[in-house]
């Protein structure tokens, strides 16, 4: 009977150690694959009526608050999350390094390519560096919307895949953008 009790205690100890090891490995795997750098999408919206079909607009879609920790992320991709698109829109995400001499917080919404605000303005590509939080330079992700026909395009944030040190993650973040592109009445004579 004493041998059986010792065997049960050893077995219970082995199971407890194995369980703790599995829990530690699972927690580490979750931590590595679930970073939380960005705020959730739908924090604010931009867009409106009267953007003529065939026009191009640039919207400041993702910017991190000044109060956030300063981090350097390695971007893997940035893809608009399209809710609907009857305007057959061409969408692309760009990295903007805001020029401190421009004396603005970011791009906002504008019709021209924001090279007057961004000292670096390039399409997001794998391996591109993105800085978060306060300090200079400030980085922002810009959504370019080019409608090709009358209609409406609705984007609900940007799906950003990135690496933060050892951690890898994908988050949907940024602005909701709605562009209504009515038919240009001046061309319908």
Image (cartoon, helix red, strand yellow):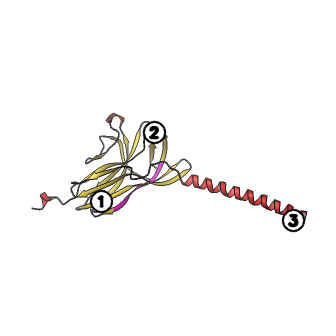
Q: CA distance from mark 3 to mark 2?
A: 60 Å
Name which of mark 3 and mark 1 comes first in the sequence: 3
Q: Which residue lies at the image location 33% right of the left edge and 34% below the top edge? A: 101
Q: Which mark is residue 153?
A: 1
- Furthest toward the left, the residue is 189
Q: Tell me which residue sits at (35%, 37%) in the image.
A: 99
> Disc count in the image?
3
Q: Nearer the viewer, residue 108 or 44?
A: 44
Mark found first going from the N terminus, 3 or 2: 3
Q: CA distance from mark 3 to mark 1?
A: 71 Å
Q: Which residue is mark 3?
A: 4
Is the residue marked by circle 3 packed among few (<14), some (14-19), or many (20+) residues within 10 Å? few
Queried whether the magenta region covers residue 112, the answer comes back as no
Q: Position of residue 42 (x, y in %)?
A: 38, 53
Which of the 4 image quarters holds residue 180? bottom left
Helix, strand or loop under label 3: helix
Where is the N terminus found, in terms of image quarters?
Answer: bottom right
Kindly identify which residue carries mark 2: 67
Q: Nearer the viewer, mark 3 or mark 1?
A: 3
**Residue 29: image location, x then y, percent:** 60, 55
Picture layout, residue 69 above or below residue 127: above
The percent coordinates of residue 189 (x first, y second) are: 9, 62
The 10 Å Cα crowd at callout 2, few under 14, some 14 to 19, many 20 or more, is few
Residue 91, compared with residue 37, is above or below; it is: below
User: Which numbered disc, 1 or 2, marks the residue closer to the eye?
Assistant: 2
Mark 1 Cα shell of 10 Å, populated few (<14), some (14-19), many (≥20):
many
Q: What number is the disc on residue 14?
A: none
Residue 76 among magenta residues = yes
Magenta extent = 74-83
- Residue at x-position 82% and y-position 60%: 9
């Amino acid at each position: 009977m004493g041998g059986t009790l010792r065997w049960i205690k050893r077995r219970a100890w082995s199971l407890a150690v194995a369980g703790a090891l599995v829990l530690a490995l699972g927690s580490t795997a979750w931590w590595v694959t679930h970073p939380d750098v960005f705020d959730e999408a739908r924090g604010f919206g931009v867009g409106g009526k009267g953007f003529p079909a065939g026009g191009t607009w640039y919207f400041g879609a993702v910017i991190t608050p000044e109060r956030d920790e300063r981090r350097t992320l390695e971007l893997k991709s940035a893809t608009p999350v399209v809710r609907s698109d009857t305007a057959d829109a061409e969408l692309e995400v760009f990295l903007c390094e805001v020029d401190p001499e421009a004396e603005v917080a970011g791009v906002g919404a504008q019709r021209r390519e924001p090279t007057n605000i961004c000292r670096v303005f390039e399409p997001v590509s794998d391996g591109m560096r993105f800085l978060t939080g306060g300090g200079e330079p400030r980085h922002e992700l810009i959504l370019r919307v080019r409608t090709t026909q009358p209609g409406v395009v609705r984007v609900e944030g940007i799906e950003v895949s990135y690496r933060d040190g050892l951690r890898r993650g994908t988050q949907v973040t940024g602005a909701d953008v709605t562009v209504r592109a009515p038919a240009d009445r001046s061309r319908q004579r």
